[in-house]
Image: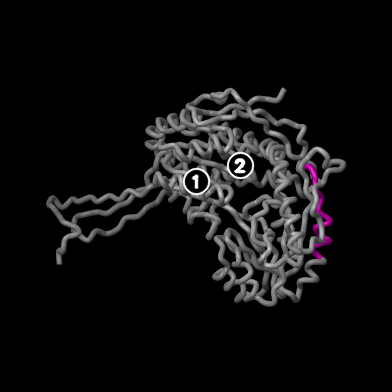
């Protein structure tokens, strides 16, 4: 019988109040049930929020360097468990072991970065316009943070959200994706082992409709951080905004790699293979558009086709495989629907375009890496996020057209250009409408100490990672200290 896992609420591991469970299955072998997890609802969220609210009263008073020291210990524990975490993550969501090891390492890096930021919650002092008066500001915690995370980076993204929230002095109610609950449970176990007090971290498993909605709606949750689709993000922003909650949204992407006629084609090929088919294309930063200068278009397509046909699709735990499964049946159906749309729109499918169902692929959700050429700007496969191993190629005449085509998109997360011309690279940095630009690198590869996020419908202006995220999870308090011994009136005409 499959092992049962629990929610962690108010310092206790407990089942959902409903008594119901949902299955966590391996997308490379759907017969394998990894575990059963609580199918929670509003009542479970209410208990978690109440616990977090009480714990916040004490946790906010713990000195920030001490909070950081706990996270340092947690990072050390994660180092010891890195291989185990990565293998379970591959079983949960499919990406190959080298990628899940990287996902886990990103979590470790974020732990250590957050630990240091416990001593760096800097703010500002400023001179007063009056004598014998001091002007200061401080960063203070906000309250209870509701965190809703996706399945494609089940360790890195929860760490991006939870660790800054904790080091800033907030308590947390955490809803992980129901496709990857085991990795999330492991993260909470590590935080508790390192010394996070009961109630400061709470995990509530279940679906977005029941658990996620309850978190967004709850009046005692002060801030929301969500990573997922733009459609759901808009709904969250509307509902949370009505309560004046602070909201951070990291949403969709339709990222383009531009290759100019003076670019290093071998390097660009490596980049697009990794960007388009790493994580089986299931990244918000995945390269789903390839914009090629006409002078190198045909040659590059020949190189690309040969390289894609050499990719090995299969179980991510087997070292010979370079592309894992799609996460579940629904995602396979979504990918197939977009492939059919691309063909009906007149694009030229040069490889892939079908689910893999024979032999080692028989029990999993595998999809052949797919490339379309002859794509035009009006096509849906050019405009809409697919979240699968599908690459759309479009030809341009020059650099100016490449910029225009790049920017013809409702999203603006990541971007890439391959060129040896420093002037073109600098213009691309300036003019690409995206929160991230890579020069001579693929559209994927964020580092935890740098801001991560985008423009347009990719988000609402906040950033994950780096220093800005600590500003999101803390409030500024301004303080005036007057030691003159007399009334001094600011905002009065003293001139």
Assess whether residue 387 is covered by the magenta stretch. Answer: no
Image quadrant containing the C terminus = bottom left
User: Residue 308: in sight, yes or no?
Assistant: yes
Q: Name the residue at 40% across, 30% down.
A: 54
Judging by the rendered image, the residue that carries numbered circle 2 is: 155
Q: Name the residue at 44% across, 37% down.
A: 218
Estimate the x, y position of residue 144 in percent, counting from the top left.
43, 38
Counting residues from the N terminus, which is met first, the one under dot 1 or under dot 2? 2
Estimate the x, y position of residue 178 in percent, counting from the top left.
62, 37
Farthest left residue in view: 486
User: Residue 104: in sight, yes or no?
Assistant: no
Q: Nearer the viewer, residue 259 or 425?
A: 259
Estimate the x, y position of residue 256 in percent, counting from the top left.
65, 63
In the picture, measured across the screen, residue 165 lies left or right of residue 206, that is left
Q: Which residues are magenta?
A: 303-315
Q: Name the residue at 72% across, 62% down.
A: 392
């Amino acid at each position: 019988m499959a092992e049962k896992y629990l929610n962690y609420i108010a310092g206790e591991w407990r089942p959902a109040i409903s008594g119901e469970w949902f299955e966590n299955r391996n997308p490379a072998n759907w017969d394998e049930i990894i575990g059963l997890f609580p199918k929670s609802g509003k009542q479970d969220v209410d208990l978690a929020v109440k616990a977090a609210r009480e714990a916040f009263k004490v946790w906010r008073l713990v000195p920030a360097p001490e909070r950081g020291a706990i996270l340092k210990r947690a990072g050390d524990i994660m180092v010891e468990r890195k291989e185990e975490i990565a293998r379970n993550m591959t079983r949960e969501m499919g990406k190959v072991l080298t990628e899940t090891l990287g996902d886990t390492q990103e979590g470790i890096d974020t732990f250590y970065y957050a630990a240091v930021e416990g001593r760096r919650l800097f703010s500002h002092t400023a001179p007063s316009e009056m004598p014998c008066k001091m002007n200061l500001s401080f960063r203070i915690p906000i309250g209870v943070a509701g965190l809703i995370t996706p399945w494609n980076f089940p360790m890195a993204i929860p760490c991006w959200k939870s660790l800054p929230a904790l080091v800033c002095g907030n308590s947390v109610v955490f809803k992980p994706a129901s496709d990857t609950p085991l990795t999330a449970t492991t993260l909470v176990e590590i935080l508790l082992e390192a010394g996070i007090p009961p109630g400061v971290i709470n995990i509530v498993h279940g679906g977005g409709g029941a658990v996620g909605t309850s978190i967004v709606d709850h009046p005692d949750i002060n801030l929301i951080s969500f990573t997922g689709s733009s459609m759901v993000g808009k709904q969250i922003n509307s509902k949370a905004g009505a309560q004046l909650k602070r909201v951070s949204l990291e949403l969709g992407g339709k990222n383009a790699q531009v290759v100019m006629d003076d670019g290093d084609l071998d390097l660009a090929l490596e980049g697009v293979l990794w960007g388009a088919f790493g994580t089986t294309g299931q990244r918000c930063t995945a390269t789903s558009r390839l914009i090629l200068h006409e002078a190198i278009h045909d040659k590059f397509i020949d190189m690309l086709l040969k390289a894609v046909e050499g990719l090995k699709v299969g179980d991510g735990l087997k070292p010979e495989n370079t592309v894992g499964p799609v996460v579940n049946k629904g995602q396979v159906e979504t990918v197939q629907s977009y492939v059919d749309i691309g063909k009906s729109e007149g694009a030229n499918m040069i490889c892939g375009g079908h689910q893999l169902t024979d032999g080692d692929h028989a029990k999993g959700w595998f999809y052949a890496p797919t490339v379309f050429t002859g794509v035009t700007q009006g096509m849906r496969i050019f405009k809409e996020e697919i979240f699968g191993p599908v690459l759309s190629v479009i030809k341009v005449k020059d650099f100016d057209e490449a910029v225009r085509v790049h920017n013809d998109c409702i999203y603006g997360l990541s971007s890439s250009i391959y060129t040896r011309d420093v002037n073109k690279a600098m213009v691309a940095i300036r003019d690409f409408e995206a929160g991230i630009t890579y020069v001579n690198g693929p559209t994927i590869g964020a580092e935890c100490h740098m801001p991560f996020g985008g423009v347009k419908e990719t988000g609402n202006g906040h950033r994950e990672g780096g220093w800005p995220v600590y500003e999101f999870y803390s409030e500024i308090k301004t303080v005036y200290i007057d030691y003159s011994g007399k009334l001094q009136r600011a905002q009065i005409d003293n001139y």
